[in-house]
Amino acid sequence: MTIRVLIADDQGMVRAGFAAFLNAQPDIEVVGEAADGAEAVFQTEQLKPDVVLMDIRMPGMDGIAATARISTARVLILTTFDLDEYLYAALRAGASGFLLKDASAAQLAEAVRVVAAGEALLSPRVTRRLIAEFTRLPRPGGLRRVERLTERETEVLTLIAQGLSNREIAQELVLSEQTVKTHIGRILAKLGLRDRAQAIVHAYEIGLVRPGS
């Protein structure tokens, strides 16, 4: 199945470079480009891509505001900035992944595949920033929301937040991968979360998982 991608970046050369590389992949097709956030939202509604590559700093509507308005595609944030405020805001807005622009071309293609498959994608440097941010943030009594989950679902959410893949979670809990996927689907539905990335954010915010645990 071909992964349909929309590229949103205010620099034409950046869009052209990303498009040329991604179109050379056998399983990826760039279906459109946008020069700002508002255009990215409009093009997403019109073209129905699977993944939007979204720059953060763009004129007019920025990438974070655009991400918050997109619900029909997964958003992979691409930026030269790894400041906490951008990282946290992007994930809270609903981004499924966050990759710095200094990543290699091969890492970019793999990131598109990972996000399209519903996985969260955070580079190691970004993950360190995220953990530092969660250490600083207050956690006001959100644990009540976890009461909606079964004991097993809570275990799965904890392992997701610790960065384990479905296969690793299955091995840890002695379950099949399909059973893990079923649990994850129920977790997202019960907590009103879009995807795995939001589940990770939520688990840290409510104190279910602590940095370094």
Image: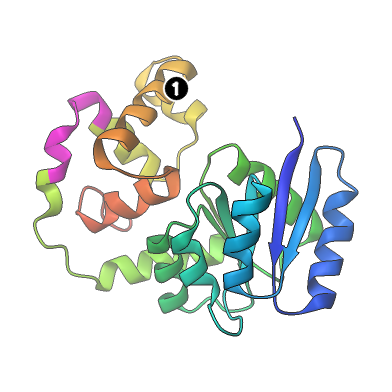
Residue at left offset 28%, top offset 49%: 203
Residue at left offset 80%, top offset 73%: 14
Residue at left offset 63%, top offset 69%: 39
* Type of the residue with mark 1: Gln
Query: Where does residue 40 sit, x and y in percent of width and height?
Result: 62, 65
For residue 68, above or below residue 166: below
Q: In which quarter of the image is the N terminus?
A: top right
Q: Judge by depth and name the residue closer to the eye, 47 or 127.
A: 47
Residue at left offset 89%, top offset 59%: 20
Residue 39 lies left or right of residue 106; in this view the side is: left
Q: Which residue lies under the disc numbered 1?
A: 171
Segment tinted magenta in the rendering: 145-153
Query: Where does residue 15 sit, x and y in percent of width and height?
Result: 79, 69
Query: Where does residue 78 sit, x and y in percent of width and height?
Result: 63, 67
Crowd class of label 1 (few under 14; some 14 to 19; many from 20; radius 10 Å): few
Q: Main secondary structure of the magenta part?
A: helix
Residue 213 lies left or right of residue 17; in this view the side is: left
Query: Where does residue 120 sit, x and y in percent of width and height?
Result: 51, 47
Please say whether residue 6 is one of the residues in the magenta stretch.
no
